[in-house]
Amino acid sequence: MALDICNEALGIEVLHSDGGVEVTLRGELDIATAPVLREHLAEFLDQGWTDITLDIAELRYIESAGLRCSS
């Protein structure tokens, strides 16, 4: 199952599989968009997903606020 979440700066595509969740990010991950990603990652953990892969290959820009989301 795939889910697309987009705003003007950050696109998030979520693909659920039997083994885990793959999250593909597009656009910009910065102080303004990091809370959106953090919220979705927290939801995945609350749902019991422990195998979460972040694909950042299509990000145009990432700053330290975005990097903190994945820790």
Image (cartoon, rainbow, N blue to C red):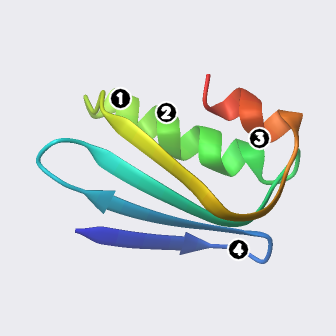
Mark 3 or 4: the one toward you:
3
Q: Are marks 2 and 1 in contact (CB under 8 Å)?
A: yes
Q: Position of residue 45 (x, y in %)?
A: 38, 29
The N terminus appears in which quarter of the rendering? bottom left
Identify residue for label 4: 7
Spatial distance from mark 3 to mark 4, Cα to Cα? 16 Å
Q: Earlier in the sequence, mark 2 or mark 4?
A: 4
Alpha carbons under labels 1 and 4: distance apart: 23 Å
Residue drawn at x 67%, y 33% is: 69
Which callout, 3 or 1, points to the residue nearer the camera?
3
Q: Are marks 1 and 4 in contact (CB under 8 Å)?
A: no
Residue occupied by mark 1: 46
Q: Earlier in the sequence, mark 3 or mark 2?
A: 2
Report helix, strand or loop for mark 1.
helix
Q: Quadrant of residue 52?
A: top left
The extreme top residue here reads: 71
What residue would you read off at disc 3? 66
Q: Residue furthest left?
A: 18
- Rendered image quadrant of residue 58: bottom right
